[in-house]
Image (spheres, rainbow, N blue to C red):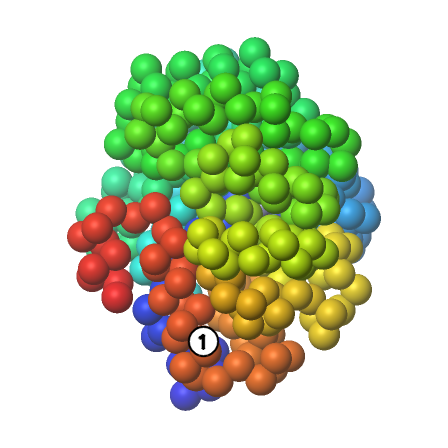
Amino acid sequence: DTPHDRLRTLPRAEVHVHLEGCLPVPQLEAWARRFGEPLPRPPEQLLKFEGLADFLHFLDWACGLVRSREELAEAAYGFSQRLAASGTGYVDLIFNPTHWKPWHGRLAAMVDALDAGFRAAEQDGLPPVGLCVSLLRTQSADAAAELVDTLVALRHPRVVALSIDGNEASAGRTGPRFAEAFRRAGAAGLKRTVHAGESSGPEGVRDAIEWLGADRIDHGVRAIEDPALVALLAERQIPLGVCPTSNLKLGVYPSIDVHPVDRLRRAGVPVSLNTDDPALLETTLEAEYALCQAAFGWTDDDLRAVARTSIDASFANADVKTRLR
Ligand code: ADE
Ligand code: ZN
């Protein structure tokens, strides 16, 4: 009974993980060989990322290798299998259509293929998954409106939220540009989740709340730089989906000792732990819990409380939440 075994039995959800970052590397290498596509860099440097921009570029290459409906459905099924193996009870899975070039213009077919994989997985007793369909920061207001129109017309029960991810540093201020798209998504009954406070400072987190009506913030860690904002997150109980290993590997913080997740939690902000892109960042959900336990001296009760926050902060339906708690 290792610490990781014990963590695997902790009832919890994961609310910040990208399908694009979950494609297993051996699978990517096999697809690349099959299509005669060269690797973007030498195999031993494949997962050495220079930062977020380099990482996002890699996602385009990886997703460009997934071309058929069967491959996409298999990717979904494989995701659910690994979820079950790590003991995670539910996932809000972010999926950004812009990275998947072979599928551009075919969002309904993509959602359908993913849904087929997740439905088969659920029928086999694997955990439920909700999709958060994501805009990329660098898209236009028109492109955002078009995506929301498509999602609202689709009304697919698998889709639980509108999301936005990508690099805030290269996109400028995006709150005002996407406000209308997020307003319409909210009016149509979708939840709203926003990457902010990773490649932006606290002002990005404030925009996510004030302009985009975020139900949850993905990362959000740089809110720590503005005490009034930390107080606002605590007062409104807006949850942050924190990804410690991702922040270290993509250069947001130099070491776990200076990572703000513990300070945010002590300030009363609801924080959950997540993997972001586990296959490419070489982490697991158990490892994220173990990392914080070791760095911040979190007790078993602290871990249980963080795990409980992950369930409360998720977009799972009431039945699933009750079962998990
Ligand atoms: N897409 C996948 N991982 C991401 C991250 N950490 N930040 C922004 N966009 C992403
Ligand atoms: Zn992310």
For the residue labelled by badge 1, is the local secondary structure a helix, a strand or a loop? helix
Q: Quadrant of residue 59?
A: top right
For this orientation, the residue located farthest to the bottom is 1
Above-or-below relation of 8 to 237: below
What quarter of the picture does the N terminus occupy? bottom left
Task: Looking at the picture, tell me which residue is in the foreground, 140 or 21.
Answer: 140
Q: Quadrant of residue 113?
A: top left
User: Residue at horizontal 47%, vertical 46%?
Assistant: 216
Neighbor class of circle 1 (other Cα within 10 Å; few <14, some 14-19, many 20+) is many
Q: Is mark 1 within 8 Å of ligand 2?
A: no
User: Residue at horizontal 21%, vertical 50%?
Assistant: 318
What quarter of the picture does the C terminus occupy? bottom left
Number of numbered tags placed on the structure image = 1
| Residue topped by disc 1 | 303
User: Residue at horizontal 48%, vertical 21%?
Assistant: 181
Measuring from the top left, give residue 63's x and y in whole percent. 58, 33
Measuring from the top left, give residue 136's x and y in whole percent. 60, 29
Measuring from the top left, give residue 91's x and y in whole percent. 38, 51
Task: Report the side of 7 relative to 253 (left or right).
Answer: left
Q: Amino acid at mark 1?
A: Leu
Whether residue 4 appears in this view of the structure is yes
Above-or-below relation of 137 to 208: above
